[in-house]
């Protein structure tokens, strides 16, 4: 018996089908005669993005003002589940105030590679940390009576060709790396909605992937909510429905509704499948009607919460000779465009219109610090300027301290496009070089949502990574610099010395048909720590204005306890991290894996006993031969550290496991056994997969069809290349006009498949019209 059986029995087939796609861009379909209301789904992960005018997916039209909190990449550095819950609560309350029922976030895809254009919107390279934080944020959002929507399920690892790329990943890496965070988010956060990804996973679109959806999500994890497509993420509507996708967004003008009706009338689809989908969606609609729980939002209070979140998430990376916090009486030069025009959030569907935005330069002027002035220093979007460098140098020479604000500009990281390298702009690097040559006390303040190379790290005295700190980042940063707040953030991702050191660097991104994850489980610290590759800053690293002492480690069957003492003169926060190290493994594994953490606030000389939950099952690995988790017998060292490289306490235990046969033939996987993943041969990768994957390149000679992308027109002479070059020229023109956000949005068009054109235009451009255009393109 379905939960909403009585209502479903009164519905016509056409009415049931109509509920399976949106009424418009952001709302579900309503059925007035049955008192079924329409509900609104809208972005976003770090603040409400409800568009006030005409709706569009990628932020060309402004949204109504709302509190812009730090992005996920920033919040992850807090390692603070309670903070994530609070941020979720605040964003959710603003959603309720605007009659929004489903908030599209948090995003928790794994940061496979530093060049991922949407890394700012995701938490970490580690699935345990990602999953725990996502679960907390989900609970916070849903405490308002509405729904969160973790995304993008699953293996959404690149923006280039994201709507068609086939992510080829071995079964063990799929479960241990790419699914584990979602498992934690689903089982512990209990979201009412989950968003599927655009991409394919091992040959099947994620949205219609029977194994991922039916076996893993619904059966293994007992998910009871609704699955919604990413906007335009439907491929085959009937396959999606069979897999368990209830809601397609946005509206297709009834096109796919008719496909559902036809499939049932032709006995291609059983009506029971549709009824079950309608039942789940109705439950979501009736459970989340936010108008009945409207809340008054205190804008000032929410801004203060955004400031607090930013303070607790910034990371002190370097502090030579305790140059920070700044001292009274010092003259301080403020240099860099990002000081006056802050880089505080990402771009694309998560773009928030902040309620206020004090810049660091404004905030610092309100402190007791002695500022000698401000100099822009460089052009934000690149290009050399001798005048700007000379002004910066002159200001530096007359100051005791130089605060140099560097970062990634708005066009460097955005939805729809991946970064081309891991570097800051050449003009910024030239300015650092010049200033460090003439001044001994340069402190870099870095803004950006992802990893960058820092060739200047050894030449400056201090580095604070502000990441993308939201609308409160200016005030948060000034409080840290002045010493009113002691930074306690820890990196949620590893900072390599060079991009070439990254394990996925030789394989990223997939350029055409497939993206091969030849590095397997060796993502981030799992590679660097296992292979002993030197890094600039390790996973879990972050300095403080005080110091901490660890002692008295005790292990029980359910948790680990230890004592942490603040041995310095300032109050501060410390994050103790648990890394499990298998000593007797018979398969290739990372040397250490994060399996727990705890954050504690301590006054000077204060000591506290803290606990980290841990059971032996957390040491298990996914056995692809069994298609289940397996626990090896043997010794395991439980390491407690301030980072993965700063282990303070250790204790070795012996675990009696299930001792299932190892799933691998080591002779066929020598590179994986040595964590030497930069040069994986075809034969070895295919042996790991257990099959030969499809070709990684497009067949450029074949005719284009409805499932091909607009990007493939570049290979078709005549009309195809003309349209392709027109889109490219539009992008170049927008970049030249310093409109990077709009320029990057052209990639949404380029990545689109021809089949999506009729759906995105609600039938204004028909499938028949697209077929005719394809025919002309293919004629060349």
Image: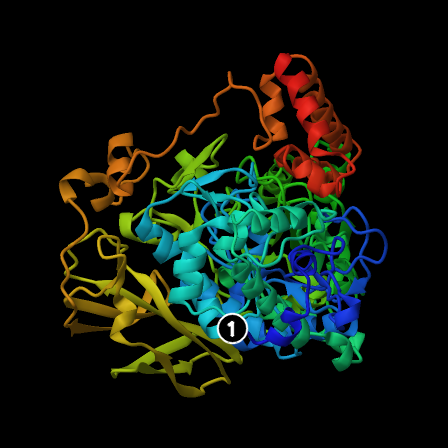
Name the element at disc 1. Answer: loop
Q: Is residue 188 left or right of residue 714?
A: left
Front residue of this view, candidates 340 and 329: 340
Quickly name the residue at label 1: 190
Q: Nearer the viewer, residue 413 or 642?
A: 413
Q: Is residue 493 visible?
A: yes
Q: Name the residue at 63% across, 47% down.
A: 407
Image quadrant where residue 425 sits: top right
Q: State the image quarter where residue 685 is shown.
A: top left
Relative placement, left or right, of 303 versus 539 is: right
Tell me: residue 111, above or below residue 356. above
Image coords of residue 362 (percent x, y) = 79, 61
Residue 236: quadrant of the picture: top right
Q: Nearer the viewer, residue 302 or 564?
A: 302
Instruction: Determine whether, in the image, residue 601 is placed left or right of residue 693.
Output: right
Q: Is residue 740 above or below residue 29?
A: above
On screen, residue 408 above or below 83: above
Residue furthest out toward the right: 53
Crowd class of label 1 (few under 14; some 14 to 19; many from 20; radius 10 Å)? many
- Where residue 776 sits: x, y (%)? 68, 17
Q: Position of residue 149 (x, y in %)?
A: 59, 64
Q: How is the image coloured?
A: rainbow
| The C terminus - image quarter | top right
Q: Is residue 323 visible?
A: no
Give the side of residue 387 with respect to residue 515, left or right: right
Q: How far across and how far down the image is residue 351, in percent?
A: 72, 54
**What is the total number of numbered labels drawn onto the structure image?**
1
Residue name at image x 74 percent, y 67 percent = 67
């Amino acid at each position: 018996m379905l939960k909403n059986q009585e209502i479903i029995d009164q519905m016509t087939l056409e009415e049931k089908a109509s509920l399976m796609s949106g009424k418009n861009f952001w709302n579900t379909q309503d059925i007035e005669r049955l008192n079924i209301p329409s509900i609104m789904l809208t972005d976003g992960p770090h603040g409400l993005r409800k568009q006030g005018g005409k709706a569009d997916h990628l932020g060309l039209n402004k949204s109504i003002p709302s509190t812009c909190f730090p992005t996920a990449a920033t919040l992850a550095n807090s390692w603070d589940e309670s903070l994530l819950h609070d941020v979720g609560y605040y964003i959710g309350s603003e959603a309720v105030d605007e009659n929004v029922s489903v908030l599209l976030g948090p995003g928790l895809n794994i940061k496979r590679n530093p060049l991922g254009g949407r890394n700012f919107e995701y938490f970490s390279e580690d699935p345990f940390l990602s999953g725990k934080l996502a679960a907390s944020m989900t609970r916070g959002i849903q405490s308002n009576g509405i729904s969160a929507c973790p995304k993008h399920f699953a293996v959404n690892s690149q923006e280039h060709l994201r709507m068609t790329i086939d992510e080829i990943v071995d079964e063990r890496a799929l479960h241990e790396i790419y699914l584990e965070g979602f498992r934690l988010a689903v089982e512990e956060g209990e979201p009412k909605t989950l968003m599927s990804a655009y991409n394919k996973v091992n040959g099947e679109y994620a949205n219609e992937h029977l194994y991922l959806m039916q076996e893993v999500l619904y059966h293994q994890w007992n998910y009871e909510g609704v699955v919604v497509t990413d906007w335009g993420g439907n491929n085959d509507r009937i396959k999606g429905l069979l897999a368990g996708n209830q809601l397609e967004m946005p509206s297709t003008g009834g096109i796919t509704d008719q496909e559902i009706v036809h499939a049932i009338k032709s006995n291609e689809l059983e009506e029971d499948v549709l009824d079950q989908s309608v039942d789940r969606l109705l439950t979501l609609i009736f459970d989340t009607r936010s108008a009945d729980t409207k809340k008054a939002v205190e804008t000032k209070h929410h801004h203060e919460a955004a400031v607090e979140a930013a303070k607790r998430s910034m990371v002190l990376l370097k502090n030579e000779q305790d140059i920070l916090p700044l001292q009274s009486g010092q003259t301080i030069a403020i240099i860099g465009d990002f000081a006056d025009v802050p880089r505080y959030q990402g771009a694309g569907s998560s773009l928030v219109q902040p309620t206020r935005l004090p810049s660091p330069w404004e905030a610092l002027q309100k402190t007791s610090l002695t500022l000698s002035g401000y100099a822009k220093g460089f052009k934000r979007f690149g290009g050399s300027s001798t005048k700007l460098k000379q002004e910066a140098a002159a200001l530096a020479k007359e100051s005791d301290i130089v605060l140099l604000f560097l970062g990634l500009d708005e066009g460097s990281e955005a939805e729809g496009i991946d970064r081309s390298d891991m570097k800051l702009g050449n003009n910024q690097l030239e300015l650092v070089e010049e200033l460090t040559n003439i001044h001994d006390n340069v402190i870099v303040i870095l803004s950006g949502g992802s990893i960058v190379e820092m060739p200047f790290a050894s030449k400056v005295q201090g580095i604070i990574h502000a990441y993308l700190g939201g609308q409160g980042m200016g005030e948060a940063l000034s409080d840290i610099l002045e010493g009113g707040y002691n930074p306690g953030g820890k990196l949620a991702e590893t900072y390599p010395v060079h991009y070439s050191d990254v394990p996925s660097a030789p394989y990223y991104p997939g350029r055409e048909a497939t993206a091969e994850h030849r590095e397997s489980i060796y993502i981030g610290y799992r590679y660097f720590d296992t292979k002993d590759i030197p890094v600039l800053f390790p996973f879990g690293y972050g300095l403080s204005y005080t110091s901490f002492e660890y002692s008295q480690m005790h292990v029980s069957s359910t948790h680990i306890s230890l004592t942490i003492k603040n041995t310095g003169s300032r109050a501060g926060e410390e994050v103790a991290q648990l890394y499990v190290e298998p000593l007797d493994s018979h398969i290739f594994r990372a040397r250490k894996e994060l399996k727990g953490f705890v954050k504690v606030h301590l006054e000077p000389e204060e000591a506290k006993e803290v606990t980290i939950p841990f059971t032996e099952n957390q040491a298990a690995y996914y056995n692809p031969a069994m298609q289940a988790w397996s626990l090896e017998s043997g010794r395991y060292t439980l390491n407690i550290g301030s980072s993965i490289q700063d282990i303070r306490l250790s204790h070795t235990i012996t675990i009696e496991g299930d001792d299932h046969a190892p799933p691998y033939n080591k002779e066929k996987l020598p590179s994986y056994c040595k964590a030497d993943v930069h040069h994986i041969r075809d034969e070895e990768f295919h042996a790991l997969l257990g099959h030969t994957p499809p070709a990684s390149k497009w067949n450029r000679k074949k005719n284009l069809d409805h499932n091909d992308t607009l990007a493939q027109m570049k290979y078709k002479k005549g009309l195809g290349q003309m349209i392709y070059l027109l889109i490219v020229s539009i992008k170049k023109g927008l970049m030249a006009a310093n409109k990077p956000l709009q320029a990057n949005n052209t990639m949404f068009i380029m990545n689109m498949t021809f089949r999506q054109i009729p759906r995105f235009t609600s039938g204004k451009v028909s499938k028949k019209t697209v077929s005719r255009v394809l025919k002309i393109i293919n004629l060349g």
